[in-house]
Amino acid sequence: MKTFDTVKDLNLDELRTALSSTREEQFKLRFKKSRGDLKQTHLLRKAKIKVAQILTLISQKKEEV
């Protein structure tokens, strides 16, 4: 997962790519949790926050255009 400082400098297409990869990572974490394999459950919350940050950046970039 990229940090917020590196993500905020991306263009719109790169943000969409980062969003899809973060959502995929979030799905995998939820799947691991449901099987009982996930020991670091805090990663689920971090992935959720990252998705929200990327969605916010996408909406801000759309308003700029």
Image: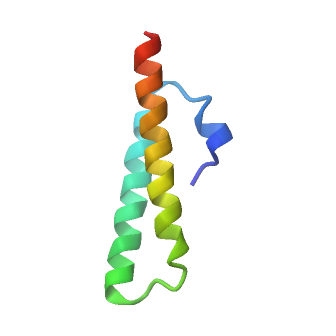
Q: Can you give x and y, in whole percent of width and height, for residue 49 in the image?
A: 49, 53
Asked whether the viewer can see residue 24, the reply is yes
The residue at 54%/73% (across/down) is 42
Asked whether the viewer can see residue 14, the reply is no
The residue at 48%/59% (across/down) is 47
Q: Can you give x and y, in whole percent of width and height, for residue 28 in the image?
A: 37, 69
Q: Is residue 7 above or below residue 44?
A: above
Q: In the image, 20: left or right of 39?
A: left
The residue at 43%/9% (across/down) is 65
Q: In the image, 35: left or right of 4?
A: left
Q: Please state which of residues 62 and 24 is positioned toward the viewer in this rendering.
A: 62
The residue at 50%/78% (across/down) is 41
Instruction: Check the image and name the residue furthest to the right.
Output: 5
Q: Can you give x and y, in whole percent of width and height, for residue 57 in the image?
A: 49, 31
Q: How is the image coloured?
A: rainbow
The quadrant the N terminus occupies is bottom right
Instruction: Check the image and name the residue furthest to the top.
Output: 65
Q: Can you give x and y, in whole percent of width and height, for residue 60 in the image?
A: 46, 23
